[in-house]
Amino acid sequence: MQRAGLLATSLIALVVIAVQAAPAAAQSPGGGAAAGDANGSVVARLTPGTAGASLGGEIQVELITLGGGGELQVQEADVRGGRAEFAAAADPTLTHLVRVIYGGVQYFSDPVLLSAELPAAEVEVRVFETTSETPPLSIASTVVTVLALDREAAELTLVREDRVQNASDHVYVGVTTEDGATSTLRLPLPEATRDASGLSEEGRFVLGGGTLDVDTPLRPGVTSVVTRYTVGYDRAVDAYRLRVTAPLPTESVEVRVPARFVRDLRTLDDAERVTDTELEGERLLVAASTGAAREGQGTLVELRGLSGSSASNPLTEGRGPLLATALAVVLLPAAIGAFAWARRRRAASAP
């Protein structure tokens, strides 16, 4: 079976980081080589972002060090006076990230690079109190990208990114129902969805009746929610109508399709063709909403000519993996989070 998967390389790389690096890091609770070769330091300064709140309860702070070859090491430190300090290697080939878990919600610092000239750094990480009361929510942008085309199975793989805006100073964690389920966002499914899931280990993604129910914590500011869908299409029609429905008031909707996957991208309801974009030699056809979308409003496009002449495999072409880096930026924190959660689960289950 021949598959064309634009972002497969990125996803595989992130899974390798999250899964294969975990045992090595778990065997080095003090940070392994990163701590042993330490000639620098990273200080994390924690500040409350919720008005009138002070840091209280359990706080977990980790320094995650990413090597150029994909190595990943983790060390933990206690919080004293709202600060946590780590010994770290002042090596410019390493990238350091501070990860904080507060109130069951994780936060990441900006990346930190140390060197012999700049061996110390201090980063601020703002943390927030949680709430189950729905705050003012909207979506800054929704982008749906066709990532893979399986012509033998008549399937498309889509990835959707919703940049959800929370105008409050609390993290929205949803309301727990009698069956123990929570939901912070309900994403309407595309037509003929066969499978759907989230691309993050944070929160749960439950395929329901017509929606993908997400309970990812929605932080103040913007939270990126990335989800994946497998949809079927009719070979006889040789087309697929993709409706992107807004679960909240949404400022803009965009659909991107690799030009070699289709003969044409036709716009229908509340959509218009805009300038094609190109990334590392891969041309993408782009359609965008004609304006802001109300809750429940859909942007409809049609992908025509899916049968094509042949579906080349970007895994062997070189340029497909380069395009894959676009989503890697979004998914890297999720991969790190997946690794850290798996590490803690193994530690808890160890005899």
Image (tube, rainbow, N blue to C red):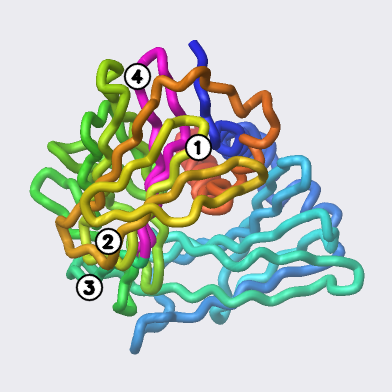
CA gap, disc 2 to disc 3? 10 Å
Give the SS element for disc 2: loop
**Counting other residues with Cα less than 10 Å from the Cα at mark 1, is it few (<14), some (14-19), or many (20 or more)?**
some
Q: Name the residue under label 2.
A: 173
Cβ atoms under marks 2 and 4 closer than 8 Å: no
Residue count near mark 4 (Cα–Cα under 10 Å), binned few <14, some 14–19, many ≥20: some
Q: Which of marks 1 and 3 is nearer the N terminus?
A: 3
| Residue that numbered label 1 is attached to | 259
Amino acid, disc 3: Pro
Q: Main secondary structure of the magenta part?
A: strand
Relative image position of residue 134 (x, y in whole percent): 19, 69
In this view, the mark in front (4 or 3): 4
Q: Could you tell me which residue is drawn at 35 percent across and 31 percent down?
A: 304
Q: How far apart are marks 1 and 4 (CA)?
A: 18 Å
Q: Looking at the image, which residue sits at the far left?
A: 178
Q: Name the residue under label 4.
A: 154
